[in-house]
Amino acid sequence: MTQARRDTVRELMAQAAIVLVSPKFAENVGSAARIAANMGINRLILVCREMPDREKMDRLATAKAAHLVETLECYQELGEALAPFGWVLGTSARQGRKRTTVNSPRQLMGEILPQLKNNRVALLFGPEDRGLANEELRYCNQITTIPTVDFSSLNLAQAVAILCHELHYSVLDAVSRSTFPKAVPRQGNKQELEAMFTHVEEALQAIGFFKKGDDDYWMQSIRQFLGRIGLKSKEIKIIRGVCGQLLWRDGQRPQKRT
């Protein structure tokens, strides 16, 4: 591989970040940092109340990934941590009525690759004992389950390693073969999307769309649909403008475009 192609792989992988929600063991954070460094990911984010033990993180990160522990970002709320990202891939070993769009990491990489040039991509992982809850998965554009034979639960660091490897391999293969898919334009980030979803929910409530307390179910479906499409900032503003007009007609808001 030429140096130019190696540089392209590094630039694309630098668009990705690992986001860990409430990790219970500092050692897993250190291992995640080491994995990220190996695969060219230079951003590690925690969503937790307290910073894990630094010495334990450093021990597993080793000197090669010490810089990721040093620059570790920590947020109190998941929405704040994901605000700048345009695409979020969540991990879950559980299936259910509210977890309908689930594919293996390898199946999803073809959809993630076009995002990398113009959008920041987050690989989202839950705590070791329970994984991501439904209210955390609602931020995800896609949800993936790592295929296993019988025992579906993996160690957090193992799950991080598998997803990072699949992403790195897909980028490396596409760049090496000069078959990288056409880049997706910059999309609206999670901060813009969450404001839009709040606006959509208000408008649907105003027109009586929800029945018998089924708003959570329908909003989850709407999130999944619009999340998979990938909306640009201009498109988000259009949807919010429509919602604002509906609310104005219903008398709940003054007529003002957002």
Image (cartoon, helix red, strand yellow):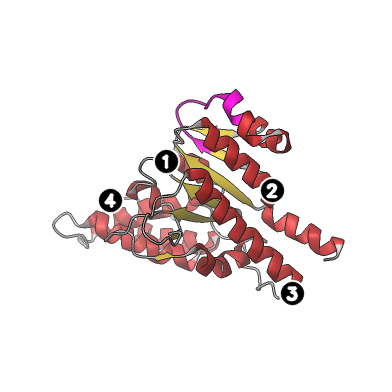
- N-term mark: 1 or 3: 1
Q: CA distance from mark 1 to mark 4?
A: 44 Å
Q: Secondary structure at mark 2?
A: helix
Q: Determine which of the numbered discs, if any, sits on residue 128 in the image.
A: 1
**Does label 4 or label 2 sit earlier along the sequence?**
2
Q: Residue at x 51, y 66 (%)?
A: 108
Q: Which residue is mark 2?
A: 38
Looking at the image, do the residues carrying marks 1 and 3 touch, with CB atoms under 8 Å apart?
no
Which amino acid type is marked by label 4? Gln
Instruction: Please give the residue where the numbered disc 4 appears in the rendered image.
Output: 252
The span picked out in magenta is: 46-57
Q: Is residue 27 left or right of residue 71?
A: left
Marks 4 and 3, the one that precedes in the sequence:
3
Q: Nearer the viewer, mark 1 or mark 3?
A: 1
Q: What percent of the width, then of the height, locates residue 21?
A: 46, 40
Q: Is residue 245 above or below residue 46?
A: below
Which sits in the foreground, 27 or 77? 27
Q: For the residues marked 4 and 3, what is the alpha-carbon distance in whole angstroms?
A: 55 Å
Task: Give left or right: position of 226 versus 108.
Answer: left
Total numbered labels: 4
> According to the image, label 3 marks what residue?
177
Between 130 and 86, the residue placed more toward the observer is 130
Q: Which of the labelled discs sits on residue 188, or is there none?
A: none
The percent coordinates of residue 79 (x first, y second) are 45, 43
Q: Residue 148: horizontal and vertical position, in percent?
A: 42, 60
Residue 51 magenta = yes
SS label for mark 3: loop
Residue 123 vertical position relative to residue 107 in the rendered view, above or below: above
